[in-house]
Amino acid sequence: MQTIGIKQPSSDGSGDGPGGGAVDSPPGRDALYLLSGAGVVAGGAGLVLVLSGADSPLRGPLALFFLLAAPSAAFAAALRGFDPWARCLVSAAGAIAVVMLVAQGMLATHHWSIDGGVIAVGALSAVAFLLQWSARFRK
């Protein structure tokens, strides 16, 4: 569990936080949360645009972002003990491998479709994320 450190209130009672104290936040932490939220919104928009069949110029780039970000996030969540750069590299390589395996499997079985590929990658990513999440709480 993460704890948040709080500075003691100054003698004159002025400060940023409630009660006069300022809350300590590591630099760049808010930017990380903002980028994570923007990534989730972009991936969700890509999923919605592909599944709805919308005719938008953003459909391709956002769908590609979803296809790479969903498995990458699932792999990154499972690799918490790694160095951040190694975790990023391994999760990106894993995401590319998942997308290629799904495409290869769909082509081999003659069931290729854009919607099916996006759903298959999303489902595999969700299963991988839920498996590692349940394993973490089982310990």
Image: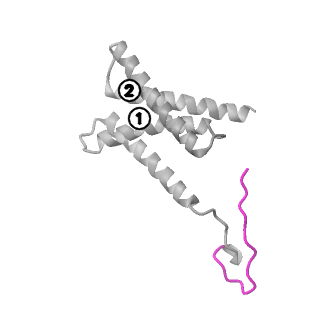
Depth order, front residue of 49/82: 82
Q: Are marks 1 and 2 in contact (CB under 8 Å)?
A: yes
Q: Where is residue 37 drawn, in percent x and y? A: 49, 51
- Which of the two discs, 1 and 2, labels the residue nearer the N terminus? 1
Residue for badge 1: 67
| Amino acid type at mark 2 | Gly
State which region is magenta: 1-17
Q: Residue at x 52, y 32 (%)?
A: 126
Depth order, front residue of 98/114: 98
Q: Where is residue 31 drawn, in percent x and y? A: 52, 59
Q: Is residue 68 left or right of residue 13?
A: left
Q: Is residue 43 left or right of residue 10?
A: left
Q: Residue at x 41, y 38 (%)?
A: 66
Q: Where is residue 91 drawn, in percent x and y? A: 52, 36
Q: Is residue 56 above or below residue 102?
A: below
Label 2: state its secondary structure: helix
Q: Residue furthest top?
A: 109
Q: Residue at x 40, y 46 (%)?
A: 42
Residue for badge 2: 117
| Amino acid type at mark 1 | Leu
Q: Is residue 23 left or right of residue 129?
A: right
Q: Is residue 11 magenta?
A: yes
Q: Which quadrant is home to the C terminus?
A: top right
